[in-house]
């Protein structure tokens, strides 16, 4: 004989919200077990002569709620072997009730049907208290899951599961990543429960200052209006760019094309690098924003022509990251950064359907700075096994290429000179790769050093009443050597 499992909603906490069908089922005489008896209607139901048990004892000593809910599911199916069971939960079975979701999953696996008796959720009671219509947008979030559930300041937000002031403190800190500290919020406790309902208006920074918060507590955050201070999101940037590009927007922004914006994309990328080198966090925030603007700009232009939009860009990179990290998002595992990088390259070759190593070399963008491109090309060739055995062999190649340049540099064969000079530079890049030195950054550092030393000799010449143009090369070289000594002394003083 197959016994019947019924899942029933008790409403948010008042007999006004419990359905007549639910009361009739509870009076049926079948075994009734509550997820928790910490619910305002329980005593009133018992006063009607309804006998009920609860799973409250399972909460004691459990590591987390998931462990409790798994135990509840196990117990329910054990009981179902002997008799019909009614499992009663607060509110609605389908709102913020993870035990029911686990129960449905297990029942599906076991091919067992569940009868559901609907109940009014706490959300309806909260909306009644706030006198709000959610049709314009309401995002409901679990206060215990804000690490993965993202608030939306552009719409109303309801935070559930605010069990205590300690939980509220953690929620407050997470919300401050999306809202200013002075954002008005509403704390709602016991919505719809006569004698227990409590409403508190406060600022976000005050959220954890109320000791009466418990399992019946939620927090409501109204939409941040346009004329109010707010923290912006990616969606806001996309909307702002759309407004700049529309017919009533900015004439300069409307005029731009993919081609005209190329120079700005490069400039912004280099300005980010400069901010990183300066170790200036505020400047990094600004420059990363400028770089992100260029990406959104290009996406908007493409959307207007019907090619793609920013959602396609975000979807593409997310899919790529998941696909190329099977050691994170799949069952494959690696233990070192080298293995992770090798796996990344392997997945990339598979994704690009590369039939040969040459295809990988050709795929390195020609628009990269020449030093950077040669560095990447050599690295891909080395992955295929085309490489020197050691750095000494690579250094010997520099000597060989230098000798070939010396043989032609005094001739009129310009093409040959260019070729041999290119070969020499390419060989130097190879040594840099062996030494794990980025040649682009190395040359950049040397250029900055040259400027600093040149500034020193010019300043010394000025102090001596001379102009560089009037000095001999030997005099300038002597000052150059002095500049090196001066630089070393400055460095020594740092330690």
Image (cartoon, helix red, strand yellow):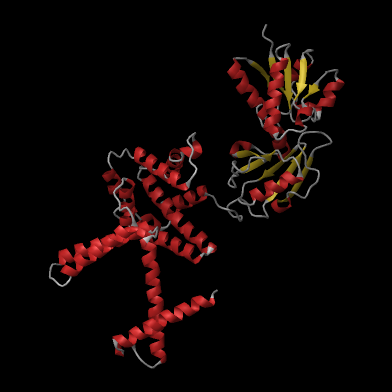
Q: Is residue 111 left or right of residue 80?
A: left
Task: Determine whether 317 is above or below 394 in the image.
Answer: above
Task: Determine whether 355 is above or below 293 in the image.
Answer: above
Quadrant of the drawing holding the C terminus:
bottom right
Residue 38: give x, y in percent of width and height. 80, 30
| x 68%, y 46%: residue | 171
Q: Is residue 188 left or right of residue 354?
A: right
| x 27%, y 63%: residue | 398
Q: Is residue 36 visible?
A: no
| x 36%, y 66%: residue | 443
Task: Determine whether 482 is above or below 275 in the image.
Answer: below
Q: Is residue 439 visible?
A: yes
Residue 387: give x, y in percent of width and height. 30, 51
Q: Is residue 179 left or right of residue 320?
A: right
Residue 468: give x, y in percent of width and height. 33, 87
| x 35%, y 60%: residue | 432
Residue 112: give x, y in percent of width and height. 62, 14
Task: Determine whether 124 is above or below 473 in the image.
Answer: above
User: In front: 184, or 89?
Assistant: 89
Q: Is residue 218 left or right of residue 290?
A: right
The single residue placed furthest to the top in the displayed view is 1
The single residue placed furthest to the left in the displayed view is 412
The answer to which image quadrant residue 193 occupies is top right
User: In front: 214, or 488?
Assistant: 488
Quadrant of the drawing holding the N terminus:
top right
């Amino acid at each position: 004989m197959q016994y019947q499992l019924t899942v029933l909603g008790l409403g948010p906490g008042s007999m006004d919200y419990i359905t007549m069908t639910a009361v009739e089922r509870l009076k049926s005489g079948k075994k009734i077990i509550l997820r928790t008896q910490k619910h305002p209607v329980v005593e009133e139901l018992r006063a009607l002569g309804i006998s009920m048990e609860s799973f409250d004892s399972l909460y004691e000593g459990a590591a987390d709620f998931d462990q409790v809910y798994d135990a509840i599911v196990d117990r329910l199916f054990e009981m179902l072997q002997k008799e019909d069971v009614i499992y009663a939960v607060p509110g609605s079975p389908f709102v913020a009730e993870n035990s029911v979701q686990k129960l449905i999953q297990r029942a599906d696996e076991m091919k067992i049907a569940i009868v559901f008796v609907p109940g009014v959720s706490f959300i309806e009671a909260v909306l009644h208290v706030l006198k709000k219509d959610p049709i314009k947008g309401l995002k409901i979030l679990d206060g215990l899951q804000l690490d993965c559930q993202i608030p939306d300041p552009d719409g109303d937000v309801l935070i559930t599961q605010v069990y205590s002031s300690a939980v509220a403190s953690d929620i407050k800190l997470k919300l401050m990543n999306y809202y200013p500290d002075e954002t008005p919020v509403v704390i709602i406790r016991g919505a719809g429960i006569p004698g227990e309902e409590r409403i508190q208006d406060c600022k976000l920074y005050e959220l954890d200052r109320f000791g009466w918060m418990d399992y019946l507590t939620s927090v409501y955050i109204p939409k941040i209006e346009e004329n109010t201070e707010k923290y912006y999101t990616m969606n806001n940037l996309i909307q702002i760019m759309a407004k700049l590009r529309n017919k009533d927007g900015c004439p300069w922004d409307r005029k731009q094309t993919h081609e005209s914006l190329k120079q700005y994309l490069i400039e912004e990328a280099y300005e980010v690098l400069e901010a990183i080198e300066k170790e200036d966090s505020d400047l990094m925030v600004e420059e990363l924003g400028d770089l992100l603007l260029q990406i959104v700009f290009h996406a908007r232009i493409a959307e207007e022509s019907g090619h793609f939009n920013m959602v396609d860009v975000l979807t593409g990179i997310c899919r790529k990251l998941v696909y190329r990290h099977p050691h994170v998002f799949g069952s494959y595992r690696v233990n070192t950064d080298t293995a992770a990088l090798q796996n990344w390259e392997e997945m990339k070759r598979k994704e690009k359907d590369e039939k040969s190593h040459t295809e990988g070399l050709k795929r390195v963008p020609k628009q990269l700075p020449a030093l950077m491109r040669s560095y990447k090309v050599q690295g891909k060739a080395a992955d295929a096994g085309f490489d020197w055995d050691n750095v000494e062999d690579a250094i010997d190649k520099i000597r060989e290429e230098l000798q070939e340049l010396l043989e032609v540099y005094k001739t009129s064969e310009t093409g040959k000179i260019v070729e041999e000079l290119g070969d020499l530079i390419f060989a130097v890049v190879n040594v840099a790769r062996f030494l794990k030195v980025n040649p682009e950054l190395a040359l950049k550092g040397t250029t900055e050093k040259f400027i600093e030393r040149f500034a020193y000799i010019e300043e010394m010449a000025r102090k001596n009443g001379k102009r560089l143009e009037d000095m001999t090369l030997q005099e300038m070289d002597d000052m150059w050597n002095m500049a090196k000594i001066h630089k070393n002394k400055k460095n020594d003083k740092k330690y």
